[in-house]
Structure formats: C-alpha cells, structure tokens
Image: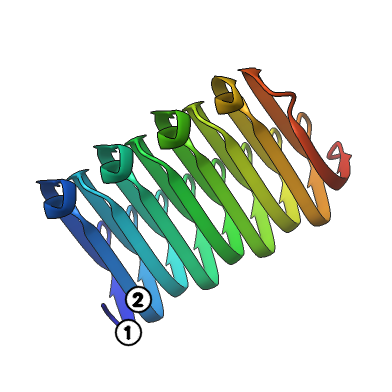
Amino acid sequence: SVADVTTTGDYAEGVYARSYGTGADGAVSVTAAGAVSTTGRRADGVHARSSGGPVTVSVADVTTAGNYAEGVYARSYGTGADGAVSVTAAGAVSTTGRGADGVHARSSGGPVTVSVADVTTTGDYAEGVYARSYGTGADGAVSVTAAGAVSTTGRSADGVHARSSGGPVTVSVADVTTAGRGAEGVYARSYGTGADGAVSVTAAGAVSTTGRGADGVQARSSGGQEPRGRAQCRSRLAP
C-alpha cells in the first residue's frame, strides 16, 4: 500500500509487485491511495503480476509518459479463482506514448474485472482499457465498467477492448471518444459457445470515433448468444 509515487527514467516503474507462488500463496495486491507518476520508456505506473495467484490492484490517479508505459498492468498466469485479475481505478488514469494502455488486465485462465473512472491515452496502439481472459466459462468472464470519460488518440487505440477465449464479455461505459485509424470506441469479443459466448455492451453516454475503420461499437461472438447492447454512436472518417 502506497501514497504518492514519482519516478523518472526508462523501465522505472512506480510500483512493481511480483509473485512466483500459486493459489493464495501467489496472491498479489496493490493499493495506491495517492498519485502515481512515471516518466520513461516502459515505466508502468503499477505493474502487478503473479505466476499462479490472483492479482488485485486499486489505484487513485496514475500518470505515465513514455512508450509502452502502461498506467496499470495486471497479469495472472493462474487458472480459475487463482487466475482472477481485478483492477479498480477511482481517479484519473492518463498515459502518453505508443502502446501505453491506460489499464491492461489479463489472465491465462481466470476472470478479469476492470472498473475505472476517467481514462485518457495519447499514442498509437494505446488502448484506454484492455481486458483479456484466456479462460472458459465463468473462469473466462471479462467485465469492464467505465463510469467516467474514456478518451484515446492514436492509430488502433480502442477506447475499451474486452475479449475472452471462452467466457462471457460484459462492457458498460459512459462517454467514449477515440481519434485514430482503426480506433474503435468499444470492441467486445467472445470465442465461447452458448451462454459462455454471450457479449453485452451498454453505453449510457455518447460514443464518438474519428478515423477510417473506427467503429463506434463492435460486439462479436463466435458461437454464443446474439451480441446485445445499447449505445448512442457517432463515427466519421478523418479528412
């Protein structure tokens, strides 16, 4: 648990937490109640990872400046409950740099849950929220909630990118704005079947995209229930 953290330098992460254990012995938990700020290439604000346990991250404000310097990176290689990844960002997450996702949450075989307020990214391939599970069924469930404004600027910089190899995907957002070729407002995808392939997207505010191939909302399922959702979208090609 930390308050304010500031670093300057390539690979100088604000908080780095790593476990090689499994199950409860591999659990990783990070709480940052103050402001986390980093400047430098691959200098993540928070980097939390476990070889076989659940990962939980809770932050307030996070700011990074540097290519591939993600605001929050949370990763578990566990399965089931031991692979659960949970990220909560109550404040503002802001990144500047190529490939610098605001929040990057991923699990090899457990559910992934992300809840954020405001997220802003500037840079090609810098997604606002990237949430991914390789699990199946409930262990592959992916849930993203963005209560504030999500804004990205850059090629292929989706506002929210949520995907599962075999579980349901649920996305709920307020306002989403993207500017860049192929930068979709919300991309939600499941490769599951039946109920495990369900995809749901709800946008309570406005979704606006600018750029060729930048869909407002793209919801897809390989073999599950018909994707459903509600959104107000506006997309246009860049001049």
Residue 93 — which label? none
Q: Dividing the image into 4 quarters, which one contains the C terminus?
A: top right
**Residue 228 location (% of width, % of height):** 77, 34
Q: Report the residue marked by disc 2.
A: 32
Which comes before the other along the chain, label 2 or label 1?
A: 1
Residue 3 — which label? 1
Q: Is residue 197 left or right of residue 98?
A: right
**23 over 225 or under it: above or below:** below
Q: Is residue 167 left or right of residue 50?
A: right
Q: Residue at x 52, y 67 (%)?
A: 93
**15 over 84 or under it: above or below:** below
What residue type is disc 2 on? Ala
* Element at label 1: loop
* Element at label 2: strand
Contact (CB < 8 A) between labels 2 and 1? yes
Q: Dividing the image into 4 quarters, which one contains the N terminus?
A: bottom left
Report the colour scheme: rainbow
Q: Is residue 30 left or right of residue 137?
A: left
